[in-house]
Image (tube, coloured by chain):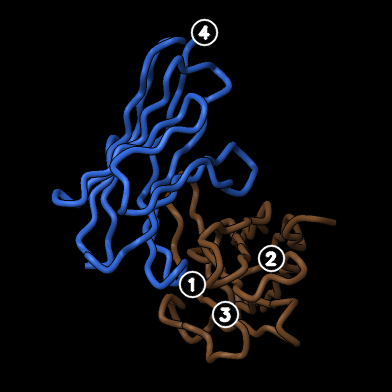
Amino acid sequence: QQQVKQSPQSLIVQKGGIPIINCAYENTAFDYFPWYQQFPGKGPALLIAIRPDVSEKKEGRFTISFNKSAKQFSLHIMDSQPGDSATYFCAASSNYGQNFVFGPGTRLSVLP
Amino acid sequence: GAGVSQSPSNKVTEKGKDVELRCDPISGHTALYWYRQSLGQGLEFLIYFQGNSAPDKSGLPSDRFSAERTGGSVSTLTIQRTQQEDSAVYLCASSLGYTTGELFFGEGSRLTVL
């Protein structure tokens, strides 16, 4: 019940494409859903996050779509660039950030 | 510095030796997490400290792993009698705890056990 599932494991798109990464959870107590971006040799960094009271959040080229009833959320990257090539992790937590659970990650490659 | 600092950045050790990994969280952050990331894999939760509360040790893989946090600030992760399967990047993260969900990660300590 604590698990967060993430797909696909890897993704290759052309520059300008719109990669979509999907995550699903079981624990209805989760109330915070962030996405982290990790470049090789670096620690993950927060990209964008959403709480379950909204269905969509957009920051620049990054959008989270949230479906509370289906217990699913996804990350869309508009007009993807080679610099977006990284590993993306979805996560979920409850109690205002306690007990983070991370998905297994998606390795994105954006071809020039 | 302004970010989470981890040391050493790289550690090579022989099987059976003990290692200590250090994490300096962002000043004022009450929550501190340790994660393990094996090559090309996801983030495996190890332990969580929040203020003066008892730590959540539920992710520690064996009794060879332990961690402490002194004075609510610096944390040390200790691995005793290291094994080859302990080779991984150990990531530390801190946050403001209950006021925000954002985790700030360090760059990690890469441990190689020969």
Badge 2 or badge 1: first in the primary sequence: 2
- Would residue A108 be seen by someone viewing this image from the given angle? yes
Q: Which residue is mark 3?
A: B49
Question: Quick one: SS at disc 3?
Answer: strand
Q: Position of residue B1 (x, y in %)?
A: 85, 56
Circles 3 and 4: CB distance less than 8 Å?
no
Which chain letter matches label 4? A
Q: Residue at coordinates 72% horizontally, 67% vertically from top-left?
A: B25
Front: mark 1 or 3:
3
Tell me: A61 left or right of B1.
left
Q: Which residue matches tag 2? A: B13
Nearer-the-camera pick, B112 or B58: B58
Same subunit: marks 1 and 3: yes
Mark closest to the chain's N terminus, 2 or 3: 2
Q: Are marks 2 and 3 in contact (CB under 8 Å)?
A: no
How crowded is the residue under tag 1: few (<14 C-alpha within 10 Å), some, or many (20+)?
Answer: many
Chain A palette colour: blue
Tell me if mark 2 has few (under 14), some (14-19) or many (20+) residues whose alpha carbon lies within 10 angstroms of its own. some
Label 1 with label 3: CB-CB less than 8 Å: no
Kindly identify the amino acid type of the residue bearing the numbered disc 2: Thr
How far apart marks 2 and 3 lie (CA) works out to: 27 Å
Q: Amino acid at mark 1?
A: Leu
In the picture of the structure, the residue carrying the numbered disc 1 is B46
Which residue is the site of mark 4? Answer: A112
Q: Residue at point 47% right, 66% down?
A: A97
Q: Residues within 10 Å of mark 4 (few under 14, many from 20)?
A: few
Residue B70, above or below A18: below
* Labels 2, 1: one chain: yes
The circle on residue B55 is none
Q: Nearer the viewer, residue B12 or A41?
A: A41
